[in-house]
Amino acid sequence: MLSVNHAVLRYGVIEALHGISFEIEEGEIVTLLGANGAGKSTTLRMISGLHAPSSGSIVFEGRDVTHVKAHEFSSFGISHVPEGRRIFAQMTVEENLEMGAFRRRGSLTGDIDEIYAMFPILQDRQKQKGANLSGGEQQMLAIGRALMAKPRLLLLDEPSMGLAPKIIQQIFEIISQIRDQGTTVFVVEQNAQQALRLADRGYVMENGRIVFGDSAAKLLDDPRVRAVYLGEPVDS
Ligand code: ATP
């Protein structure tokens, strides 16, 4: 579905991605793990056209999208839930959801109802402003808003950030449900244990490079992952 090929990305003189390559197959949940500053968010921003690579290519469903701009992306079938959610704080829940579909025509009622079926708490809060929601509700709204664009590929940047374990569990169950309903998911996470339980496959990123990738089950067993990302002592 998506392939990133030898992508190099620079912020001015700083090279943040040093030629990364990876693939996502349709129907998968793939996770990208790595420490702070490894380049995970940059990778998502590159896929969704916010920053173009200076070399390399990105191919989505057989089409070269390397230089497609962010505002064109939702019509290509990719939605991005950024780090920190970025919901519209002064708009209501319902208005936020409508904004997610601003490039589509026709009635949105049925689609909003589908989001409410997935996140019943958002229906209860539909007239409240985004600013008044809890962190977990804001994350649900950010995901719901992204789904309103009817993406085939959903990019999620640290959906568990700052949330209580019970809420994280709920969000991860919903991500699984989103995949079961036919949307492929690429999720950046620092919460490696839970991300690998959720995902089919994972990639590990360090200092702007993808250092390895494997099935989630193998990564959960990999001593390097266990030592660095799951906080286990390394056997000598
Ligand atoms: P985090 O979890 O902390 O967001 P990350 O793995 O997502 O980490 P990135 O945010 O992608 O990492 O950052 C990768 C590198 O690029 C870091 O060295 C960071 O300082 C740098 N960087 C990120 N955004 C910018 C920017 N807008 N301008 C300049 N440098 C940036």
Image (cartoon, grey):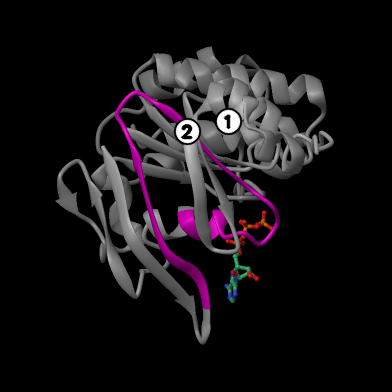
Left or right: residue 174 compared with residue 107: right
Residue 166 spot, x, y in % from top left: 79, 19
Name the one closer to the observer, 69 or 28: 28
Q: Is residue 31 magenta?
A: yes
Q: Nearer the viewer, residue 94 or 70?
A: 70
Tag 2: amino acid: Asp
Q: Which mark is residue 219?
A: 1
Give the residue drawn at x 43%, y 71%.
9
Of 111 and 41, nearer the camera is 41
> Secondary structure under badge 1?
helix
Residue 117 position within the rendered picture, expressed as x and y whole percent measured from the top left: 52, 12
Q: Amino acid at mark 1?
A: Leu
Quadrant where the N terminus is found in the figure? top left
Q: Is residue 119 left or right of residue 62?
A: right
| Residue 141 included in the magenta stretch of the image | no
**Residue that label 2 marks:** 214
* 15 shown above or below 75: below
Q: Residues within 10 Å of mark 1 (few under 14, many from 20)?
A: many
Give percent across and percent down for residue 58. 28, 56
Q: CA distance from mark 1 to mark 2?
A: 6 Å
Q: Is residue 220 visible?
A: yes
The residue range painted magenta reads: 15-43
Local SS, label 2: strand
Q: Which of the 4 quarters of the picture holds residue 227? A: top right
